[in-house]
Amino acid sequence: MDNTISSKIVTSSAKDIVTPQIVSVSYWIATPSVGSLNHWGLALLAALSTLVLIFVLVLLGIKLLNSSLSSTKQKFLTKAIWSLIAFGPIGWLLILSRLYGIVFFSARFWWVIWFACLIAVCVYLYRNYRKIPAKEHSIQTYQLKKRYFPKKKR
């Protein structure tokens, strides 16, 4: 009698095990149904896309308004602006395609790719930002050496 009860428990618990939805390919590629659209999630993604766009505009404003920036800082700001400029509009494209149910662009894997690329670009920019003092120091030492170089004869 003990064996039948335990076998029933094992079979009933095995039937209840369902693979997680995240593992299936259709979760990442399929167009979401209207009921599955979480407005808080979309609002969070819209806020993040807007913040990236605002950050790019702030960097552009700093670059254009601050004329006392060194050349290395100006180059870094230019690199940051060109690296991040596409993330805001692409994020909004993904949000709007998800709201309107555009099949190809409303897939969840585009958001994963978007986040991965954003993180990769931020890490790349952070590494370049940490190199700015060393570059400025090498430029200053070169300018000091340049004073003592022989002048060109006319």
Image (cartoon, rainbow, N blue to C red):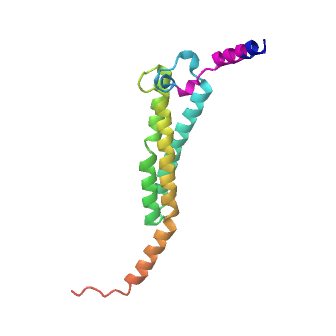
Residue 9 in percent (x, y) is at 72, 16
Image quadrant where one finds the N terminus: top right
Q: Examine the rendered structure and indicate whether residue 123 appears above or below residue 111.
A: below
Q: Examine the rendered structure and indicate whether residue 64 appears above or below residue 10.
A: below
Which residue is at the far right?
Answer: 2
Residue 67 in percent (x, y) is at 47, 62
Residue 92 magenta-highlighted: no
The number of numbered badges drawn on the structure is 0
Residue 8 magenta-highlighted: yes
Q: Examine the rendered structure and indicate whether residue 100 appears above or below residue 124.
A: above
Q: Is residue 8 left or right of residue 48?
A: right
Does the image show residue 61?
A: no
Image quadrant where one finds the C terminus: bottom left
Residue 45 in percent (x, y) is at 56, 33
Q: What residue is at 46 percent from the left and 46 percent from the top?
A: 84
Which segment is the magenta one?
A: 7-23
Q: What residue is at 44 percent from the left and 60 percent from the top?
A: 74
Does the image show residue 69?
A: yes
Residue 109 in percent (x, y) is at 48, 31
Name the dominant secondary structure of the magenta segment: helix
Q: What residue is at 54 percent from the left and 16 percent from the top?
A: 34
Q: Examine the rendered structure and indicate whether residue 37 appears above or below residue 127.
A: above
